[in-house]
Amino acid sequence: MHKSFFGKDDPEILIWQADTRTMNPTISESMIQRELEKDPVSALAEWFGSFRQDISAAFPLEAIEACTIPGRRELMPALEHYLAFADPSGGRHDQFTLAIAHLHGDETVVLDCIRATKPPFDPGEVVKDYVETLKRYRVSGVTGDNYGGEWPKAEFAKHGIDYRLSEKHKSDLYLSLIPVLTSRRVELLENDKLITELRRLERRRGRSGKDSIDHGARGSDDVANAVAGVVDVVLTNGAADLDDYASYGDRASAQYKYDFSDENYSHFASRKNRFDW
C-alpha cells in the first residue's frame, strides 16, 4: 500500500507517515529518547515512523565495543557473590559453554569468566572441569537451557551443583540484552569468539509482530548464549551484598600480589577508583 499510494493523489486512499511527536506533541520527548537508547531498531519503528527490515543485525558493533573492556580476558574471584549460566552440549556439534558474572552497584553486570569447550568431547568430563571453575568462584548453582532433558541436572548434581532451567528462551535472553548493551550496563571481556557471535546474530521480525534473534545459517552462538543468559540472571537475581564491596580491596590487593599482570592491575586500579577507597 505504501509503495503504491504514498505521495500520490487518490480519491479513496491516503497514506500518512509521520513520527509520534508530530502526531501527538503531548508525548514526552525524554521518554522517546529513553526508548531509543534501550532499543534503537524497535524505537525507530515505534516512535519515528520508520519501516522495519525483515532481517537486521541484533547488536551494533559500536555497542559491543563500547561495553568491551580492552585487555580484560578474565577476572579472578575476589567477591562472595557470583552467578553462572551454562549452555550444555552433547559433545558432537556445538560447544559446551559457561559464563560467570557479578553485579556491580545497582545495575551494572561485570562479566568475570567465560569457558568454551569445542567438540568432540566427553560431556561428563566437561561438567567436571566446569564444576571446578564454579567452585573457585563460590558458585553453588548454575542456570542453563533445557538441552538434554534431565541429563545436565543430574550430571551437575553429582558434583554438588544445582542446575536450574532458564525460564527464558535464548531469543528472549538476546532481546533482554539489547537495552543492557545499548545503555552500557554491562562490562564484557575481550573475547574474540563472543564479539564475533554477537556481531553475527540476526534479528528477525515475526509475522505475529514479535522479534526473534538467532544466528544465521552455519553460524554459532554458544558463547553469546551463555553470556546473555548470565547477564539476565545477574540482573534478575544478582544483588550483591554491600559487605562484599567493602572488603573487596583487601582481598583484591592480596590476590594481585600473586597475579600482578598489567591486565589484572588495570582492573584492580579501576576497581579501586570505582569504590572510592
Image (tube, rainbow, N blue to C red):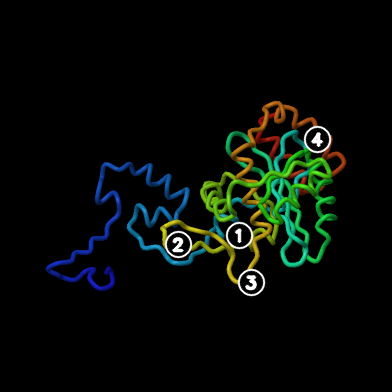
In the depicted structure, whether residue 9 falls above or below residue 238? below
Q: What mark, if any, has residue 218 been given in the picture?
A: 3
In this rendering, position of residue 172 left or right of residue 7: right
Q: Residue furthest bottom?
A: 4
Q: Which residue is mark 2?
A: 205
Q: Residues within 10 Å of mark 4 (few under 14, many from 20)?
A: some
Q: Secondary structure at mark 4?
A: helix
Discs 1/2, front: 2
The amino acid on which the numbered mark 2 sits, given as a three-letter code, is Arg
Determine the residue positioned at 37% across, 46% down: 32
Proximity of marks 1 and 2: CB atoms separated by less than 8 Å: no
The amino acid on which the numbered mark 1 sits, given as a three-letter code, is Leu
Q: Earlier in the sequence, mark 1 or mark 4?
A: 1
Q: Quadrant of residue 216?
A: bottom right
Q: Residues within 10 Å of mark 1 (few under 14, many from 20)?
A: many
Q: Earlier in the sequence, mark 4 or mark 3?
A: 3
Proximity of marks 4 and 2: CB atoms separated by less than 8 Å: no
Q: What mark, if any, has residue 253 been given in the picture?
A: 4
In the depicted structure, whether residue 40 falls above or below residue 207? above
Q: Which residue is mark 1?
A: 198
In the depicted structure, whether residue 116 falls above or below residue 232? below
In this rendering, position of residue 211 left or right of residue 18: right
Q: Position of residue 189 (x, y in %)?
A: 69, 51
Determine the residue positioned at 30% across, 51% down: 20
Discs 1/3, front: 3
Q: Secondary structure at mark 3?
A: loop
Q: Position of residue 12 (x, y in %)?
A: 14, 67
Q: What separation in Å lies between label 4 and label 3 (alpha carbons)?
A: 45 Å
Q: Position of residue 16 (x, y in %)?
A: 23, 61
**Which one is nearer the viewer's eye here, 13 or 81?**
13
